[in-house]
Image (cartoon, rainbow, N blue to C red):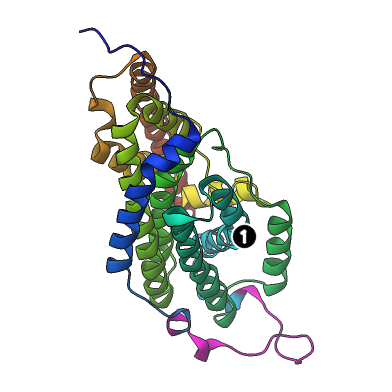
Amino acid sequence: MHNIPSRPRLSDVRLLQALEEVVERELDRHLRVFREWMPHEYVPWSRGRDFDGPLGGEPWSPEQSPLTEVGRVSLVVNLLTEDNLPSYHHEIATLFGRDGAWGTWVHQWTAEEARHSTVLRDYLLASRAVDPVALERARMAHARTGFVSDNRHSPLHTVAYVAFQELATRVSHRNTGHESGDPVCDRMLAQVANDENLHMLFYRNLLAAALELAPDQALSAVKEVVTGFRMPGHGMPGFERAAARIALGGVYNLRVHHDDVLQPVLRHLGILEIGGLGPEGLRAQQELGLFLDGLDGQARRFDERRAAILSRRSSKTG
């Protein structure tokens, strides 16, 4: 079968204009299904008490934390990631614009995301789950670094990235809640994860429209995003060490990334089955298939190493 000759490439401006109607439709759908919730209702305020400092309260110590070790590490990473919201807003507002349906969505998304850092920080401090001084210093360091997207090449790259990243964030929050050891934390993160899922649906549907509008360009963007994917918190202090502990704890690792993030989005969009592609799209499709096979193999080897490490730990404590 011969592939279709290359189509003329659409400019970024033309793509944004062509997708504006889809953004407006998806924004209307999002607002119909989104349910308002209040961060203060999910925080265990009764656990709270004054810290040392001007109020002369009790200093923090590790034994005060109700969380498992992996729950604490993952919650801090998730919060510091959410703390960079000003940088994320700047990135997408610069790319998508502040006018029309695009601008309305950017501001709506930002307002909803702001709830997440609010409720996470309030929970951590009220439950005395982390060292508040270390947490604030980490926030300052991370916020000073800011965030520069890996996917500034085009609006299609950004749309593709957030379709996967919002699902990755949902999965990370949900698994953190399950592994936290605190039912209050689990309930809170279920609510946060629900928001992230709605955001994923918005971007996934927008990506589906882009694949119809410019299939070769969009599929090439998907391939580049998937093969170079990094979580938005990768620049925070100590991220690599924290990510290793989170991976070993089963919250987020190669297996989770492959099975619960990449594959669901790719299958829903039928990425590897799209036909009628030009040379660019066909090449991207083939390269993506090879990459996924390799990633699955890496995940299988990681699973084996993880099982061996956990077995050794279990034998030492048994």
The stretch drawn in magenta includes residue 49: yes
Residue at (41%, 26%) from the top-left corner? 220
Nearer to me, 52 or 88: 88
> Where is residue 16 drawn, in percent x and y?
44, 41
Quadrant (top left, top right, bottom left, bottom right) of the N terminus: top left
Q: Residues within 10 Å of mark 1 (few under 14, many from 20)?
A: some
Q: Is residue 102 above or below residue 131?
A: above
Left or right, 39 with reference to 147: left
Element under disc 1: helix
Main secondary structure along the magenta-highlighted residues: loop
Residue 250 in sight from this viewpoint = no
Outermost residue, top side: 2
Residue at (32%, 33%) from the top-left corner? 213
The stretch drawn in magenta includes residue 141: no
Give the quadrant of residue 128: bottom right
Q: Which residues are magenta?
A: 41-62
> Where is residue 54 drawn, in percent x and y?
79, 89
Give the quadrant of residue 73: bottom right
> Where is residue 127 drawn, in percent x and y?
54, 80
Q: Is residue 108 above or below residue 207?
A: below
Residue 2 in sight from this viewpoint = yes
Outermost residue, right side: 54
Give the amino acid type for the residue marked by disc 1 in the picture.
Pro
Residue at (30%, 47%) from the top-left corner? 205
Residue at (74%, 56%) from the top-left corner? 144
Give the quadrant of residue 188: bottom left
Q: Disc 1 marks which residue?
A: 86
Left or right, 43 with reference to 152: left
Nearer to me, 132 or 191: 191
Quadrant (top left, top right, bottom left, bottom right) of the C terminus: bottom left
